[in-house]
Image: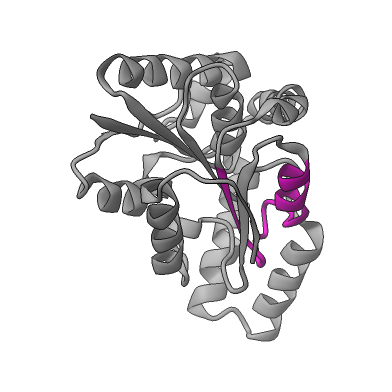
């Protein structure tokens, strides 16, 4: 049996990777989409957990899949990408997929550009949603949780050099929370002989729900179902 673990991002939920999970489930694969500790609806819960708890939960879910499945893929979005990469160095993961993995997070230039567009457009419905997202992120996330998020990235960043499994890296070029140079850094750091990097020119942060989501699903599916072979691809 084939299994696939999908990990969401910081302050997020499985919703962030749900469209991809739903599609991959059609192959008959066993899908695991855990909610990391402290995440979900109650932001107060974020004050009770640490970065180690997030890794531990992902690790527990991966172990369960490995007990049942002979082939296991791991997909990580944003912070989940950093955890996924780390797990691939400790366990027999067959392939790794990183979606807007957050080596360098929060892109100030892109953020201010979007805010300027919102003001210029006199706050259309779309721009209001964008501003609302920024406000919710900044106001509802406990400072303690942000400290642990940064700690996780700092600790796991050096671990990228230990990644050797076939890896697909996808990055939205309009990402307003993760700097696109993160993808370049990961591509250069990992030691995988088979690795691909693709940039989505119109996509922002939540790739699986953005305007190029169909392309994201297609790229991931093609990568995971392809027979393993040496490759070095940039698009």
Judging depth in this view, the residue of 40 and 92 nearest the camera is: 92
Identify the residue shown where x is 77% and y is 38%.
Answer: 189
Identify the residue shown where x is 58% and y is 57%.
Answer: 205
Q: Is residue 180 something one can see in this rendering? A: yes
The residue positioned farthest toward the front in the image shown: 229
Is residue 15 shown left or right of residue 173?
left
Residue 203 % position (x, y): 56, 67
- Asked if the magenta segment contains residue 186, the reply would be yes
Is residue 124 shown left or right of residue 6?
right
Q: Which residues are magenta?
A: 167-188
Image height of 158 relative to 235, above or below: above
Residue 204 % position (x, y): 59, 63
- Asked if the magenta segment contains residue 197, the reply would be no
Residue 51 % position (x, y): 61, 19
Residue 149 % position (x, y): 67, 29
The residue positioned farthest toward the bottom in the image shown: 121
- Where residue 10 sits, quadrant-wise, is top right
Q: Is residue 10 something one can see in this rendering? A: no
Image height of 182 relative to 5, above or below: below
Is residue 51 shown left or right of residue 147?
left
Quadrant housing the C terminus: bottom right
Identify the residue shown where x is 57% and y is 38%.
Answer: 81
Judging depth in this view, the residue of 146 and 33 nearest the camera is: 33
């Amino acid at each position: 049996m084939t299994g696939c673990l999908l990990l969401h991002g910081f302050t997020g939920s499985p919703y962030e990777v749900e469209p991809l999970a739903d599609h991959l489930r059609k192959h008959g694969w066993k899908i695991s989409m855990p909610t990391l500790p402290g995440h979900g609806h109650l932001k107060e819960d974020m004050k009770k957990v640490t970065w180690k708890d997030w890794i531990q939960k992902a690790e527990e879910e991966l172990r369960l899949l490995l007990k049942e499945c002979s082939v296991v893929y791991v997909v990580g979005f944003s912070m989940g990408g950093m955890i996924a990469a780390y797990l691939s160095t400790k366990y027999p993961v067959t392939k790794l997929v990183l979606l807007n993995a957050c080596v360098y997070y929060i892109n100030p230039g892109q953020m201010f550009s979007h805010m300027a567009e919102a003001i210029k457009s006199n706050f259309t419905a779309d721009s209001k949603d964008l501003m609302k997202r920024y406000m919710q992120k900044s106001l509802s996330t406990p400072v303690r949780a942000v400290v642990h998020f940064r700690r996780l990235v700092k600790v796991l960043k050096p671990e990228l050099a230990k990644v050797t499994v076939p890896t697909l890296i996808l990055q939205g070029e309009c990402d307003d929370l993760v700097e696109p140079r993160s993808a370049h850094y990961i591509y250069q750091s990992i030691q995988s002989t088979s690795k691909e990097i693709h940039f989505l020119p119109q996509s922002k942060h939540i790739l699986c729900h953005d305007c190029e989501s169909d392309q994201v699903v297609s790229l991931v599916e093609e990568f995971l179902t392809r027979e393993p072979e040496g490759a070095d691809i940039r698009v």
